[in-house]
Image: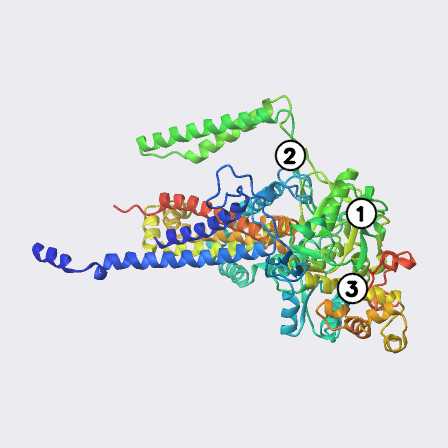
Amino acid sequence: MSRKLSTLFILLIISTLVIAGCRPSAPATAPAGGAQAQPVVETVEVVRTVVVTVEVPVPGEATAATPQVKIEVAQAPGFGDTLKAVQARGNLICGVNGQLPGFSFLDPQGNFSGFDADFCRALAAAIFGDPSKVEFRATTTQERFTVLQTGEIDVLIRNTTWTLVRDTELGLNFTATTFYDGQGIMVPKDSGIAALQDLEGGTICVQKGTTTELNLADVMATEGISYTPAVFDDVNATYGAYAEGRCDAVTSDKSQLSSVAKGLLPDPDNHVILDVTLSKEPLGPVVRHGDDQWLDIVKWTIFATFAAEEYGISSANVDEIRSSTENPEIKRLLGLEGDLGAKLGLSNDFAYNIIKLVGNYGEIYDRSLGEGTPTFIPRGLNSLYTNGGLLYSPPFR
Amino acid sequence: MNNRRAITSHAIPFWRDERFLKALVQAIFLLALALILGYFIRNMLTNLRQQGLGLGFDFLRLTAGFDIGEHLIPYNRSHTYLQAFAVGLLNTALVSGLGIILATLLGVIFGVAQLSGNFLVRSAARGYIELLRNLPLLVLLIFLYSTVFVQFPRVREAIILPGPVYLTNRGVAIPWGTPTATFPLYLQFLGAALILALLLALGLSWYGKRSGRPPLTFFWSMLTFLLVAAAGWLLLPAPPLEANLPSVQGLRLAGGLQLSPEFMALLSGLSIYTSAFIADVVRAGIQSVSRGQVEAAKSLGLTGFQTLRLVVFPQALRVIIPPLTSQYLNLTKNSSLAVAIGYPELFHVSGTVLNQSGRAVEVIALVMAVYLSISLLTSALMNLYNRRVRLVER
């Protein structure tokens, strides 16, 4: 009896979930009291309501000639919540990869270091004026969006590719691209594989739940090359299997391939990245839908690092420039003029803090991926637009 | 007497009536449960709506866009999420089905070995069981994968066992048969052979009951089946199966049946892990048959094997079947640990689907529903079998 009952309960739970899942896809029902022949009601998500209050003068009483029009912008629910929560908590929870040398990786001192980790620090510097107020949370590719959606992390800075589906259906907003990447294929040097066609019938290691997994399938289908994917859960499992010779090749973003080859593989010189690019991979921080203020904060934190490099402001000379500059653009950026920071809900010197405490884009890049580092990647597309790259900050005004 | 009882039952008001109170407690419990469930689900729906996320299973019809390494049904990137799920489900079924067969065989052998009179055999079996029962399965799987199956030599230096069986770090390749044009015809032949063997078995057992001298029913019907099958193979103009031997072609394995390291690690891990538990179940079942039964069988002049087959096992099965069922269920559910070594079974594939579609709630609910159905189905079948073998009380 009790076994049957418990089975019944489990069935109940599952079926409730299933029924709950099916409900919204049913045609929208007419509102109560509505006429039968009502047109199909489209559900419109109200993101921003503009309340317009018009005080119409009552005849006889009015003396003013013009009606007063007040416009106030009512924000969608959730606006400003993330910043408030972060400030109340006293630190920023930043989702990172944690296994990728050069981007976010535990260094021998036990700190997260790397390109992505530094953008977490820049954000903390913008909010608190203290880059150490970051709690890093290592996430797998599979769980990264769920932890962001459910609010376990405030921002995801984890070499995540910007795609339409992720931007819409997953309820996420991509802020700005911090790293322009492309998908590549790495093979052992002695394998004799020089082009995509040489991989016919081969096995390719790929990480689960990534855009690279999809791009690989797309490209191989287009080229008509048959292959077997071997799909693994995280960076270590994927490259571990590749290093053991489980696969003929491994595919991922080129930045990841080169950083892994140099940082994780036992014989970095025996691997070569093929001269093919399978896809565009714009990587950047991601936030939840519903809090536009937070989206703006993350976006403009990144733009501040771009702008600083463009104006030649670095952590070394920012104090000097601040005291001597006459350039109004720089004055606005550093918070000497205007109230740009306040408009974001931050202090006016937020960009100064970022530059002073973390550095401009070039400094962040050089620290983790620059020529002196073991994970060197040429800047290529990730140069300022003035140097033939794609980095371009909208004006600070 | 009757009269008094009638009076007392009339006198009890309903709020003190035990039957009513019991029903009431159950009703309150159900209501509370429904409320709690309702609250959680409402909470979830509200949260989803706030983030602008819908809930629905329509996404299953969308193109999956990713490839899966091992598939029993045709599948490529242009198939739907639903078909990707089906691929995962079939892989789960394959590894669980094979695992159950292997685990049962190993388990029975080690279970009987534990009761052997030979000290060496007994202690070896005991050691095997103790070792495996006290290791976490995940550790065992990762051990088998990363220190056994991926550590086999590269394809060029493959270990070649007679057969030929190739052991490489790309997987294990064994000889296999490729169906030829006459294969469908041969299948009909096999069907006929099966029917003939069954008819013979029925006839023989009927004859045995009538005469009181049971013939070797199983032996004769099996022989018939094999003879007819062999005759069919020889009579057909061309053999129905063509030997497909594995070989090394360049840097890769070709031909034969190729089993990936992930599949081999998962199958062997699940089978030997579960076999340790089954061995103990079998031992307990055999020990539950009283000694007097064995002695009686011996005094009737039955041989050792006959005693085991005709007296001990039928009685032991009654004790064995229920815990065996739960071991089978465990094995099926444990197959989801394949996610750690990358075999594309249901849970692994659903992880990819979840990530590419972003539908966490739906995907997890679907996976739970599927595992639940598999478990209930297995358990229903085993209950059916249990009803057949259990002690009929008169």
Residue drawn 57% across and 54% down?
A: B49
Q: Is residue B394 left or right of residue A48?
A: left
Of the residues shown, which amino acid type is indicated by label 1?
Leu
The C terminus of chain B is located in which quarter? top left
Res B51 → quadrant: bottom right
Residue nearest the observer in this picture, B191 or A230: A230
Residue at image coords 39%, 43%:
B384
Quadrant where the N terminus of chain B lies? bottom left
Q: Is residue B32 left or right of residue A233?
A: left
SS class, disc 3: helix
Discs 2 and 3 carry the same chain letter:
no
User: What secondary structure is marked by label 2?
Assistant: strand
Q: Are marks 1 and 2 in contact (CB under 8 Å)?
A: no
Mark 3 or mark 1: name the one nearer the start of the chain.
1
Q: On the image, numbered disc 2 is attached to which residue?
A: B177
Foreground residue among B8 and B112: B8
Residue matched to label 1? A278
Residue B54 is situated, as x and y percent measured from the top left of the image, at: 58, 50
> What distance separates the C-alpha of mark 3 from that of mark 1?
27 Å
Q: Where in the figure is residue B276, as x and y percent of width and height?
A: 51, 56
Residue that label 3 marks = A302
Q: Is residue A61 left or right of residue B36?
A: right
**Front position in the image: B263 or A209:** A209
Apparent side of residue B232 relative to residue A387 in the rendered image (left or right): left
Label 3 amino acid? Ile
Q: CA distance from mark 1 to mark 2?
A: 38 Å
Q: Residues within 10 Å of mark 3 (few under 14, many from 20)?
A: many
